[in-house]
Amino acid sequence: MNAKVQAITESQFFAPASTDMVDSLIGRYREERQRMERVVEYVSGDDFRSVISYFEDAAKRQHHQAGNTPSFKLESGLAALNASFWHQALSLTDVLDFMPTKRREEWFELIHSHKAPEFEESAVRATLADLLAQRMDFLAEKVDGIFRALSKTHVTNQPEGFGKRMILTGVTNDWGSYSRSQTGHLNDLRQVIAKFMGRDEPDWNASNRVVEISRANHRGEWVPVDGGALRIRCYMNGNAHLEVHPDMAWRLNEILHHLYPTAIPSRFRQKPKRKVKEFTLMERPLPFAVLDVLHRLGRAYDTAERSRRLIPNAVRIESHEKDKHVIAEVEQVLELLGGVKQNTNAYSWYQFGYDPDPVIKEIVCTGVIPDQKSHQFYPTPEHIARDAVELAEIGPEHDCLEPSAGIGNLADQMGACCSITCAEVSSLHADVLEAKGYYVERGDFLKMASAAKFDRIVMNPPYSQGRWQAHIEHAATMLRKNGVLVAILPASAKGKDVLPGMSLTWSKVYENQFRGASVDVVIMRAEATQ
């Protein structure tokens, strides 16, 4: 890697490093060491030596199984002091983030076993400087680790970087349990990709969850991970196929080039000139901290009963979760999936109209929920949905359609007495709708065949760039004779002849009712005049 490229890469990944940051740490270490020496000198004096044995004997009786006795030996105290301050010193920089798993564990073993070197200033500065200088090597070793773990018997595993499909063997066993060594390589790769995307770093077992969910729920299917940055396909035989998004692959190959200057051809280290149709890359995957809380959601119980009856279709954020910003985002995700927060005597949970577990697992695996900007997903408030369905005058004999259904807030108001079809472009939302029991047409509503006819269509179309107009026009072509179309539209549409040839009536204006969007809306009822 030439100096210019390395400088760009380092500025992109690494935090600014200054060895002056250890000044205060060195000062505190010296103060602690001096206090420790004074304590040892004090208790070792003639005035206290005779009584120390009593404390040691009492401690030995209290902790005889563990064999712990208080010790005022300077050597053992300094070993613990050195270990503590080495851990603090490493935490002052981002070197631990970039260390491959093996190197990081070696350092932790030195610290936990109290075998770290003495915390002497020149040694600390030299060690930190050396580790900071090795960050690019560490980063490259992480990326390289996946190749060292690849199957040696599959021809697709070629030394051309991340441009081709890769196959890992032994990722899971016959019972579906994962191999930590193999998922560890995957996790190292995802940590590097997270740096590219400006995300927080996945925890050590994040990839275990992805492999488990992929194998159990989507065996033999491609599953997007981290917003489409890569995708994985797990098989019954324990193998996992892996592909990296082209926008990530060329950057990873540039890092590999740092280790193998002559091995990675230049064409694999260049940004692709055109988009690849097979991949869709989301701009903002959910933070790993949010995904971790979603993974650990607990079951909800009816606390009013002594039997603690399990509440069906309900989840609860565990009380030990403390980060209020993370909790707020988790709550928003649950609400977007149709969860309604319930509270009873300071006990809270989220109630769903379907089993949310499969959908939540998919979010944990993929890292995303449908993006509001691209999908224009703003759930219809219950009172507006109720008013819209009431205007449609739905009877048990009617075939009904909710286009761009989201999670079915309008369909939920139609009741079970009629036949309901939902059209939805988001795969995740389609899963929610099917979990609720609706028949779902997956894909873009505007591409749905007009040959399908319905008695009642109730819709809340996307608004951006005037898309609502195209959506209501297409919906109108799908009405049967004497059919009724009800649509929630921007208030600016009120009174306009938006569907020529149809009889239109308008509701009152609902002001600023949609969470996450500053928009006033109106409900339109349209009937065919012929």
Image (cartoon, grey):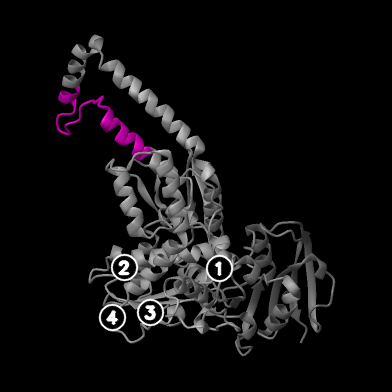
Residue at x 42%, y 71% (from the top left corner): 259
Residue 3: which numbered mark, if any? 1
Q: Earlier in the sequence, mark 2 or mark 1?
A: 1
Amino acid marked by disc 3:
Met
Is 395 placed left or right of 95 in the picture?
right
Which residue, given by chain and number where applicable, does mark 3 sit on?
Answer: 166
Q: Earlier in the sequence, mark 2 or mark 3?
A: 3
Q: Earlier in the sequence, mark 1 or mark 4?
A: 1
| CA gap, disc 2 and disc 1 | 33 Å
Amino acid marked by disc 4:
Lys
Residue 389 x, y percent position in the rendering: 65, 67
Residue 161 x, y percent position in the rendering: 43, 79
Residue 199 x, y percent position in the rendering: 53, 59
Residue 251: which numbered mark, if any? none
Q: Earlier in the sequence, mark 4 or mark 2?
A: 4
Tell which tag, 4 or 3, sits nearer the viewer: 4
What is the secondary structure assignment of the residue under circle 4? Answer: loop
Q: Would residue 392 be visible to someone looking at this image?
A: yes
| CA gap, disc 1 and disc 3 | 30 Å
Which residue, given by chain and number where applicable, does mark 2 sit on?
Answer: 182
Are circles 1 and 3 on residues that touch, CB within 8 Å? no
Q: Earlier in the sequence, mark 1 or mark 3?
A: 1
Tell which tag, 4 or 2, sits nearer the viewer: 4
What is the secondary structure assignment of the residue under circle 1? Answer: helix
What is the secondary structure assignment of the residue under circle 3? Answer: strand
| CA gap, disc 2 and disc 3 | 13 Å
Report the span colored magenta: 59-84
User: As rendered, which of 391 and 361 lies closer to the eye?
Assistant: 361
Q: Is residue 37 above or below residue 166?
A: above
Are circles 2 and 1 on residues that touch, CB within 8 Å? no
